[in-house]
Amino acid sequence: MTRKKRDLPLIEALEITTFAAEGKAMGRWNDIVVFVPMTVPGDVVDVQVRRHHRRFMEGEAVRFVSRSPRRAEPFCPHFGVCGGCKWQNLPYDEQLRFKTSQVRDQLERIGKIALPEVRPCIGSQRTQFYRNKLEFTFADRRWLTRDEIEKAAGGEIEQRPALGFHIPDMFDKILDIECCMLQPDPSNDIRNEVRRFCIENGYSFHNARAHEGLMRGIIIRTASTGEVMVIVVFNEDDRPRIESLMSHLQGRFGQITSLFYVVNTKWNDSLTDQTPVLFAGKDHITESMEGLKFKVGPKSFYQTNSEQAYVLYSTARELADLKPDDTLYDLYTGTGTIANFCARSCRKVVGIEYVPEAIEDARINSAANGIENTVFYAGDMKKVLDADFIARNGHPDVIILDPPRAGVDEPVLNVIMKAAPERMVYVSCNPATQARDLAILDAQYEVVAVQPVDMFPHTHHIENVVKLRRRNRA
């Protein structure tokens, strides 16, 4: 039988001691772990338990007995509700310290391999307005916060449509966002103007459960070069209304470089199988890094913190210790950003990626920058990277890996070990899966450097760069 809510305990004066997986703050009560959101280590709180699992509990701070000296004042008016930037209440130097500790813990606990000292996490120069891409969702009814409901005390609450972010773990609940401090201008102005125009002109907002309503989503990209891309997602092919809104945006925001729309009538929000339609401007925006130009289309992947991406790639290149005669294999090359970034430091770069469209972008980026020592291949890594492929392209002196969050498939790791490069650099956005993969590579490679890089201030997310060196065999 499910435990009734009234039976769940109120824990008094629980001390929050540390952060755990996914950045959750936690303390211990009677040797049971208790996760308490919106708290930081050093807080002492009364906690109302909301969920009691077999090995842990989840609760809510209902009273602060004392506040941690480590606390910072959150800067965003939506803090604690939208689900993003959960570490705003922690000073940035403390965030970096915990991220370094998180990397060390996961590599040691999951990987169980010998490690050098983990270097301190490299912080982001910007901790606000650092993102170059945000996605917002329409909803026919906005999410009402607890504060709003309590202040209304049973009275009437204004109900209106929303354009903002998903409430965590609720696919159909959207918090209306007035000001997001993650993306620079004109992101907020564009989003707010779209909402105003649609409401005033009677456009229907999407209802995710009924799958009805014209307005579905908007994606805004702001490049380091100052260029802006806007992609508006509609749920119906209502051409007059589409053209009216798009024309309004074109006239209202002259700084929009690339204006697209998508008609997505599917139930799911994925746009990978959809075709964006160019309404006005160029079909891409341009990112710049160390004098190189990178074409970013409506479906292109590019690191979402442009300035810190330079730090990340510089770290990877430094640890690769490239020599003029080296052949570098860049696996999971995507649109070839790392490959092109490293090309001038070695003799040849071979990039491999599963997505053919990304490989085409990689070739375009090489050509646009006058880079002639790169070659790119699309295909399944474990099938492409065989003895014949290496014979045609040259033995890799160095391999750089930058896989998705799920890490590297074990068959691919086996293929890499057969290729036997002298050095490898493993760039990961998920130290847990990276640790799992390093445990497999440990049979032939030792970890000689570990450098965390913070791409996402005020969140628990962390990129980690590891250098591996082939073990000497007798």
Image (cartoon, rainbow, N blue to C red):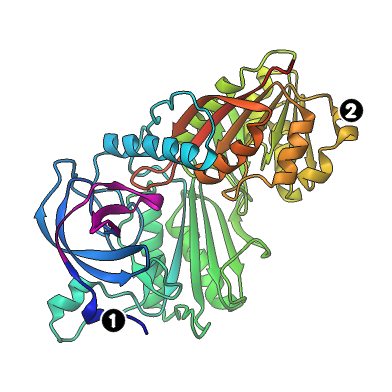
Looking at this view, is 186 or 74 the one in front?
A: 74
Residue 142: quadrant of the picture: bottom left
Residue extending farthest top: 324
Spot occupied by residue 55 in the image (x, y as percentages of width and height): 37, 62
- Quadrant of the image containing the C terminus: top right
Q: In x, y percent, where is residue 100?
A: 39, 34
Numbered tag placed on residue 159 in the rendering: 1
Query: Percent from the top left, x then y, of residue 417?
Result: 74, 32
The overriding secondary structure of the stretch rendered in magenta is: strand
Q: Nearer the viewer, residue 1 or 245?
A: 1
Q: Is residue 424 visible?
A: yes
Locate residue 117 relative to residue 281 in the image: left or right: left
Whether pointer 1 and pointer 2 mark residues with C-beta atoms closer than 8 Å, the reply is no
Quarter residue 275 falls in: bottom right
Packing grade of label 1 (10 A; few <14, some 14-19, many >=20) is few
Q: Residue at x 61, y 17 (%)?
A: 321
- Residue at mark 2: 391
- Kindly identify the amino acid type of the residue bearing the numbered disc 1: Gln
Amino acid of disc 2 = Ala
What segment is highlighted magenta in the picture? Answer: 11-33
